Amino acid sequence: MGLGSWHWPFGLPKDTQITRRSDPTSGLRMSERTASAVVATDALFPTPYHALVNTKTLAERIADTSILRGSFTLRSGRTSSWYIDKYRFSTQPDIIRDLGDLFADRIPEGTTLLAGAELGGIPLVTTASMASGLPCLFIRNQKKEYGTAKRFEGSCEQGDQVVILEDVATTGGQVLEAAAEIAATGATVNMIIAVVDRLQGARERIEAAGYAFESLFTVRDFGIDPTED
């Protein structure tokens, strides 16, 4: 049932985004955690809870917490006068909670596994796994030299339908490396979702490689012109 069939809850901004988490026992997307507001209406959703995330407020929180000014060298080798410190937003419980809900709402049907690369992708894939009910995979930067000597932590099998979660997408180089590693196991990477797209080539490069790409935000949502470098 569409949103046009109900009245928007009193006091909630119109840009509040409704997200639902997956309940693995029913196959329905739902939220099992009370968030900033809960609307009790069985007519809207066939599940008892859903979270409301104000994306504008979340963007402001990420910007206030994580955007630094100065001179920075990016992983791609280029320099920038601004930098998004992903660890500043991924270590804040309110931000990471809401990101989990937003990720869960964008995961396509049929997904069996979420993946995130060391180090920035680990908190993201963890919160998304909790929000969606899907298992997750941790991708090491390099195979460990002891114990199981694995590159992946978790189970990735042939036939898995995988979504990779990324923190900040600049050129897409690192996440494409991770996608290739996953594909080598016989699994299929169906989508890559970033928290932030710097609008500096990641989308074009990822889509050219054959993967669907989405971002929760772009730098324009933070008031940054991507040509500002």
Image: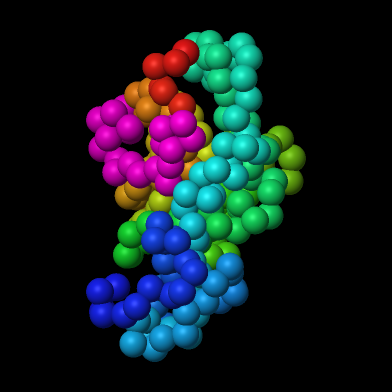
* 92 part of magenta stretch: no
- Name the outermost residue toward the right: 146
Residue 190 visible somewhere in the drawing: yes
Tell me which residue sits at (47%, 66%) in the image.
Answer: 12
Q: Position of residue 142 (x, y in %)?
A: 61, 32
Q: Position of residue 65 (x, y in %)?
A: 65, 38
Location of residue 106 by image quarter: bottom left
Location of residue 105 by image quarter: bottom left
Quarter of the image where the N terminus is located: bottom left
In magenta, the rendered stretch is 203-223
Instruction: Classify 83 as above or below 15.
Output: above
Q: Position of residue 167 (x, y in %)?
A: 53, 39
Determine whether, in the image, residue 71 is placed left or right of residue 43: right
Determine whether, in the image, residue 164 is placed left or right of residue 34: left
- Name the outermost residue toward the bottom: 42
* 206 part of magenta stretch: yes
Please tell me how many numbered marks the rendered image carries: 0
Q: Position of residue 40 (x, y in %)?
A: 47, 85
Tell me which residue sits at (47%, 52%) in the image.
Answer: 55
Instruction: Classify 143 as above or below 128.
Output: above
Determine whether, in the image, residue 123 is placed left or right of residue 128: right
Front residue of 141/65: it is 65
Tell me which residue sits at (59%, 74%) in the image.
Answer: 34
